[in-house]
Amino acid sequence: MNHYDLLYDGPRLQWPGHGIFRATSGVPGHQWSSLQCDADGGPIPEGSYALRLHLDETRPEPSADCALHPSWGVQAVPSGEAAGHCAPTWALWGHNRVRLVRTDPLPPACRVLRLPRFRGHLVYAASASSRKSASASFGVL
């Protein structure tokens, strides 16, 4: 059996020693495991991922296209006045985000469908923050 530091099962992100947090992945209406191969809106595919639990101290600045530049650490997403005209777009990210790196192959059904147009998937957790620098394994059921 694999060891995971975090476990996401659809409605919850479980972080032993820190708590269980409400979480979601995929755009509304597309949050079903049967849509995990839908790169444009489905939930994160089941499998194993790694992430870096390091706080990224840089603060995103509003730009014309409201793009949030990628980070290898936990990134705080500005809101309200600090986000300026990007506030409605950035609110979709939640308060924090972190890059997930896949550590095992995609499910067979997703390999052909996802690879040519892969944009990534997100897991939003209601409130989980850490100022530690570490890496963690992450299981998705």
Image (cartoon, rainbow, N blue to C red):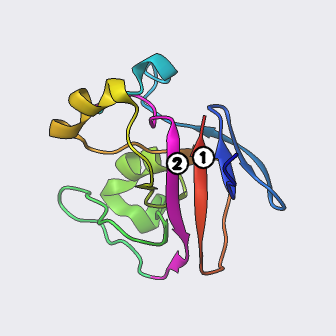
Residue that numbered label 1 is attached to: 139
Q: Amino acid at mark 1?
A: Gly
* Residue at the spot 45% in from the left edge and 56% down from the top edge: 100
Residue 129 screen position, x and y as percent: 66, 66
Magenta stretch: includes residue 15: no
Crowd band around label 1 with a 10 angstrom C-alpha radius: few (<14), some (14–19), many (20+):
many
Q: Is residue 41 above or below residue 100?
A: above
Q: Which disc number belongs to residue 58?
A: none
List the single residue furthest toward the right: 17
Q: Amino acid at mark 2?
A: Ser
Relative to 9, 111 lies left or right:
left
Label 2, label 1: how far apart the Cα atoms are: 5 Å
Q: Which disc number belongs to residue 48?
A: 2
Q: Secondary structure at mark 2?
A: strand
Which of pointers 2 and 1 lies earlier in the amino acid sequence?
A: 2
- Closer-to-camera residue (18/108): 108
On-image quarter of the C terminus: top right
* Residue at the spot 23% in from the left edge and 27% down from the top edge: 113
Quadrant location of residue 72?
A: bottom left
On-image quarter of the N terminus: top right
* Residue at the spot 38% in from the left edge and 38% down from the top edge: 106
Relative to 66, 81 lies left or right:
right
Q: Secondary structure at mark 1?
A: strand
Q: Is residue 97 above or below residue 61?
A: above
Do the residues bearing badges 2 and 1 touch, measured as CB atoms within 8 Å?
yes
Residue 127 screen position, x and y as percent: 68, 54
The range drawn in magenta is 40-57
- Closer-to-camera residue (68/140): 140
